[in-house]
Image: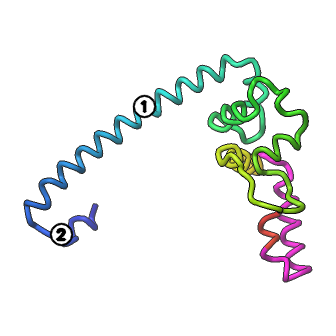
Amino acid sequence: MARFSSSVPLTEDPAVIEPLSIVAKMLVCAIRAIERTVEQLQDKIATLFAQHPDHLLFENLPGAGKNLAPRLLCVFGSDRSCWPDATAIQKYSGIAPVIELHRRLFRPKFLCQTFHEFANQSIHQSNLSGQRSFTNANVAKENPHLRHTSARL
């Protein structure tokens, strides 16, 4: 707030300030309405997730938490026959290792993002985090050309 008290206004023209002040107030009201709606949606998701028969499986995944567990449940769905094996969902979501790239294929961004966010969160829950730091440090020390890749291990 101290910065604002010492700042110089760009304009003092009431023809500019008054309408923009009204717009700013309108935007604050819109943001508050959106926040209330998001809270309602989050409550509904939490309620429906808790009622789903597989909720324990997903909420106990390390790092899934209250936000990613319902998203992961949505990814896999209730009918798991859609995914005959792990590679089927990996290929569909775009997270499968790529050996050859012939053309750019469609991949659902939300699914891919969900898996990436879960992987990031689960790293913090992993018992291997100390081992990962040790490996990264040694890879970088032994081969300086791999320093840029060791951060991604």
x, y percentage for residue 94? 76, 50
Q: CA distance from mark 2 to mark 1?
A: 35 Å
Q: In the rendered view, would you say 20 is above or below 85?
A: below
Report the span colored magenta.
125-148
Determine the image quadrant of residue 152.
Answer: bottom right
Q: In the rendered view, would you say 39 is above or below 127?
A: above
**Residue at point 19%, 55% (across, down):** 20
x, y percentage for residue 126? 81, 48
Q: Say few, some or many: other residues with alpha carbon within 10 Å of mark 1 (under 14 / 14 to 19 / 20 or more).
A: few
x, y percentage for residue 147? 81, 77
Between residues 66 and 130, which one lies in front from this camera angle? 66
Q: Residue furthest bottom?
A: 144
Residue under numbered circle 2: 9
Residue under numbered circle 1: 37
Q: Main secondary structure of the magenta part?
A: helix
Q: Amino acid at mark 1?
A: Thr
Determine the image quadrant of residue 37.
Answer: top left
- Choose the circle earlier in sequence order: 2 or 1: 2
* Quadrant showing the N terminus: bottom left
Q: Amino acid at mark 2?
A: Pro
**Residue at point 88%, 40% (across, down):** 86
Between residues 137 and 30, which one lies in front from this camera angle? 30
x, y percentage for residue 3? 28, 67
Q: Say few, some or many: other residues with alpha carbon within 10 Å of mark 2 (under 14 / 14 to 19 / 20 or more).
A: few
Q: Residue furthest left?
A: 14
Q: In the rendered view, would you say 43 is above or below 13?
A: above
Q: Is residue 80 left or right of residue 42?
A: right
| Magenta region includes residue 138 | yes
**Residue at point 85%, 77% (across, down):** 146
Provide the secondary structure element on which disc 2 rests: loop
